[in-house]
Every structure is written in C-alpha cells, then in structure tokens.
Image (tube, helix red, strand yellow):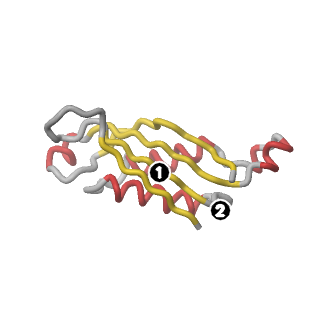
Amino acid sequence: MDKIYVNQMDFYGYHGVLPEETRLGQRFFVDLVVEADLKQAGETDELQYTINYAELYKSCKEIVEGEPYQLIEAVAEKIASVILREFPSIKTCHVKMIKPNPPIQGHYHSVAVEIKRSR
C-alpha cells in the first residue's frame, strides 16, 4: 500500500494527568502515516485523487489543540478515528504522539506512543 507521511507536526496542547499540564500546557509533536492507493494521483497529477496534506494537518491540529485528554494514548486514538472517518480512501492510519517534556525526572529525549488503526 502507498503511504503519505506528515512528520513532526508541532502543536501546543493541554493534555496530561498532572494539574500543571492541563493548566500551563506544553508542546506535542505528531507523526502521521496514512496508507491509501495513490496510483491514480501519480498517473493524473490531480489533487482529487490523493489525500490533501493540509487537511490532514488541520485535523490533527484541531484535536491536539482542542479538548484536553489525560493520556497521549487517547489523543492518538482520537486522531486515528477522525482521520479514518474524514478520509474514506485511507485504509490505515499510523499515529505517533510525542511528548517532548513530560514532568518526570530523568534524562531522555521524549516519551511517545504509536498506534496503527485500519478499516
């Protein structure tokens, strides 16, 4: 299956378990991979036969910057369900939700969850 990647989308949201996370907010990154048949788009060079990247970005932005969730797992699940609902030609949706600065002690680059949902 063909794939479209939208990498390192950068959003500011209010997700987390701790009160300061939902009060102050923080940055989140989202990597999105969607699988669809892109053959007709490649042959015709017509936008109508592919998935509009700007629309994928907009859907993710509305979710991450919208209603707060406690868990990034829930945010990733919401993104996948909305993408599959809004874009009927997408067969599979991979979402990686990255939290670069969670309030936990230690030295690390980030924490993340990655899910894959299919029709």
Residue situated in front as seen by the camera: 117 or 49: 117
Residue at (35, 59) in percent of width and height: 74
Residue at (47, 51) in percent of width and height: 95
Q: CA distance from mark 2 to mark 1?
A: 17 Å
Q: Secondary structure at mark 2?
A: loop
Quarter residue 4 falls in: top right
The numbered dot on residue 104 is none
Percent position of residue 112, x then y: 34, 45
Residue at (20, 32) in percent of width and height: 107
Q: Residues within 10 Å of mark 2 (few under 14, many from 20)?
A: few
Q: Is residue 67 above or below residue 118?
A: above
Q: Secondary structure at mark 1?
A: strand
Quarter holding the C terminus? bottom right
The numbered dot on residue 95 is 1
17 to the left or right of 50:
left
Q: Earlier in the sequence, mark 2 or mark 1?
A: 2
Label 2 belongs to which residue? 88
Amino acid marked by disc 2: Pro
Please say if the residues under marks 2 and 1 sit with CB atoms less than 8 Å apart.
Answer: no
Q: Residues within 10 Å of mark 1 (few under 14, many from 20)?
A: many
